[in-house]
């Protein structure tokens, strides 16, 4: 395997394998500060990444004790706390937050990933959430206001705000904006039937604004063109109702006013 290298933008050294280690030792710079300025530069070179990846895979396959030790650590409360604290710190950096968000959106578009996540949640429902430990965690999450509700065979996150449980922070934040604008709304009160993959389903638009006779759907931009969602949207329009789809870009990057809901 031929070695590949990174070039340091500070000193110009072009034989760097581990950029995080280099900026810490050679320039006494905190890595998070460095990647705030240069978010596009990888942490390690591709050849270094491949070597570390192959080493980890070999250890995992050929060393059962190592594999069990790693598995135990990643399942531990210690790792959960460390990872949570790290992500909270990193999430304060807008460039890194945007990078993680974009990566997760791209991954989420893959059909096999969506199915795998769905199967994992179903498995949790059938196994862990029926154990005493799972039920206790379910109770704790409910007390925190970010509840895990078991319905229709899967687990869905819900966030409480002003009398309603919302299925995402996008929906909750939109409800807050409606309250700020003194707009009366109903949340998931009416359903429309639609056909997808030769089956009849029910679609509940997120919001209905009686004042504007308008249904609102809050949907991440990466999912608006999904065939299932298009079938949902068309079911509303086919019944001669107005529907507006609002993405996270409109929700957070624009000043929402009452005029947005006039069709």
Image (cartoon, rainbow, N blue to C red):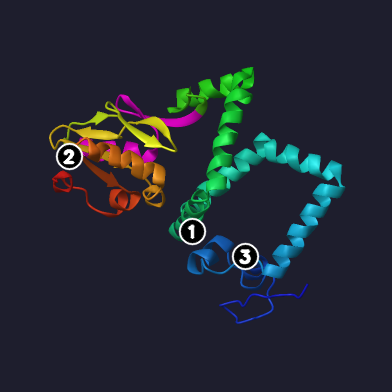
Q: Which residue is mark 2?
A: 181
- What residue lies at 64% left-to-right and 81% top-to-bottom? 13
Q: Is residue 112 above or below residue 121?
A: below
* 3D distance between C-alphas at marks 3 and 1: 14 Å
Q: Is residue 120 above or below residue 40?
A: above
Q: Which residue is mark 3?
A: 43
Q: Position of residue 91 (x, y in %)?
A: 48, 51
Mark 3 Cα-neighbour bin, 10 Å: few <14, some 14–19, many ≥20: some
242 or 54, nearer to the observer: 242
28 or 123, nearer to the observer: 123
Q: Position of residue 237 (x, y in %)?
A: 23, 40
Q: Nearer the viewer, mark 3 or mark 1?
A: 1
Mark 1 Cα-neighbour bin, 10 Å: few <14, some 14–19, many ≥20: few
The answer to whether residue 80 is left or right of residue 179 is: right
Displayed quadrant of residue 194? top left
The magenta region covers 155-180
Displayed quadrant of residue 137? top right
232 or 188, nearer to the observer: 232
Q: Position of residue 24 (x, y in %)?
A: 64, 66
Q: Are marks 3 and 1 in contact (CB under 8 Å)?
A: no
Q: Is residue 130 above or below residue 226?
A: above
> Along the polypeptide, which appears first: circle 1 or circle 2?
1
């Amino acid at each position: 395997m031929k070695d590949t290298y990174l070039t340091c933008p500070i000193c110009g050294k072009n034989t760097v394998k581990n950029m995080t280690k280099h900026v810490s030792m050679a320039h006494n710079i905190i890595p998070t500060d460095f990647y705030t300025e240069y978010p596009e530069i990888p942490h390690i070179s591709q050849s270094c990444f491949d070597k570390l990846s192959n080493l980890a895979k070999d250890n995992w396959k050929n060393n059962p004790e190592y594999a069990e030790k790693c598995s135990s650590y990643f399942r531990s409360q210690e790792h959960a706390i460390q990872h949570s604290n790290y992500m909270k710190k990193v999430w304060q950096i807008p460039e890194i937050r945007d990078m993680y968000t974009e990566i997760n959106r791209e991954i989420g578009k893959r059909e096999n990933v969506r199915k795998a996540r769905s199967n994992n949640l179903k498995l949790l429902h059938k196994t862990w959430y029926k154990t005493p430990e799972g039920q206790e965690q379910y109770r704790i999450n409910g007390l925190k206001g970010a509840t895990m509700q078991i319905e229709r065979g899967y687990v869905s996150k819900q966030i409480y705000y002003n009398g309603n449980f919302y299925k995402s922070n996008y929906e909750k934040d939109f409800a807050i904006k409606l309250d700020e604008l003194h707009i009366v709304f109903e949340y998931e009160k009416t359903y429309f039937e639609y056909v997808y993959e030769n089956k009849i389903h029910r679609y509940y638009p997120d919001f209905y604004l009686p004042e504007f006779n308008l249904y609102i759907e809050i949907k991440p931009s990466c999912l608006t063109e999904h065939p299932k969602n298009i079938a949902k949207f068309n079911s509303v329009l086919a019944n001669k109702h107005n529907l507006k789809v609002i993405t996270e870009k409109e929700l957070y990057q624009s000043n929402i006013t009452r005029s947005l809901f006039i069709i």
